[in-house]
Amino acid sequence: MTAVSVELPDEAFSALRQTPHEFVSSMRLSASIHWYSRGEISQEKAAMIAGVTREEFLMTLAAQRVDAFAVNIEDLQDELGRA
């Protein structure tokens, strides 16, 4: 696993009332949700980046009211045309 070092002002932790460890976990989950919702990564990769199981990631998406399953209209029309 690769370690990444990020310098943040001390106020960042107090603003969210989180410890540095909690802040990092939150940042990983937030980034994963963002990239997944943009279609840049899969659910599996998003869960891995967030450091949670796929089930936990799906539950988080539901709690955050983020669509768990993105449907591309063009792909759906192609699939329906093949049936």
Image: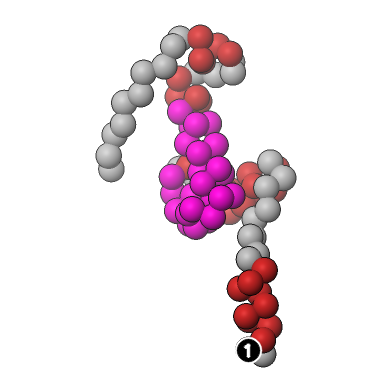
Residue 36 lies in magenta, yes or no? Answer: yes
Quarter residue 21 falls in: top left
Question: Which of the pair 24/82 is nearer the observer?
Answer: 82
- In the image, residue 74 above or below residue 69: below
Amino acid type at image mark 1: Arg
Task: Classify residue 64 as left or right of residue 21.
Answer: right
Q: Look at mark 1 in the image and give the residue it sits on.
A: 82
Which coloring applies here?
A: secondary structure
- Quadrant showing the C terminus: bottom right
Q: Is the magenta stretch mostly helix, strand or loop?
A: helix
Task: Classify residue 7 as left or right of residue 15.
Answer: left
Q: Which residue lies furthest to the front in this view?
A: 74
Residue at x 67% of width, y 47% of height: 66
Task: Tell me where residue 9 appears, x and y as whole percent.
Answer: 44, 11
Callout 1 crowding tier (Cα within 10 Å): few <14, some 14–19, many ≥20: few
Give the extent of the magenta segment. Answer: 24-49
Task: Tell me where residue 47 appears, x and y as whole percent.
Answer: 49, 49
Residue 8 visible in the shown view: yes
Residue 71 lies in magenta, yes or no? Answer: no
- In the image, residue 36 above or below residue 11: below
Element carrying mark 1: helix
Question: Which of the pair 83/10 is nearer the observer?
Answer: 83
Residue at x 55% of width, y 37% of height: 30
Residue at x 62% of width, y 52% of height: 58
Task: Tell me where residue 1 appears, x and y as whole percent.
Answer: 28, 43
Residue 53 visible in the shown view: no
Quarter residue 55 falls in: bottom right
Task: Tell me where residue 42 appears, x and y as whole percent.
Answer: 49, 57
Residue at x 72% of width, y 45% of height: 65
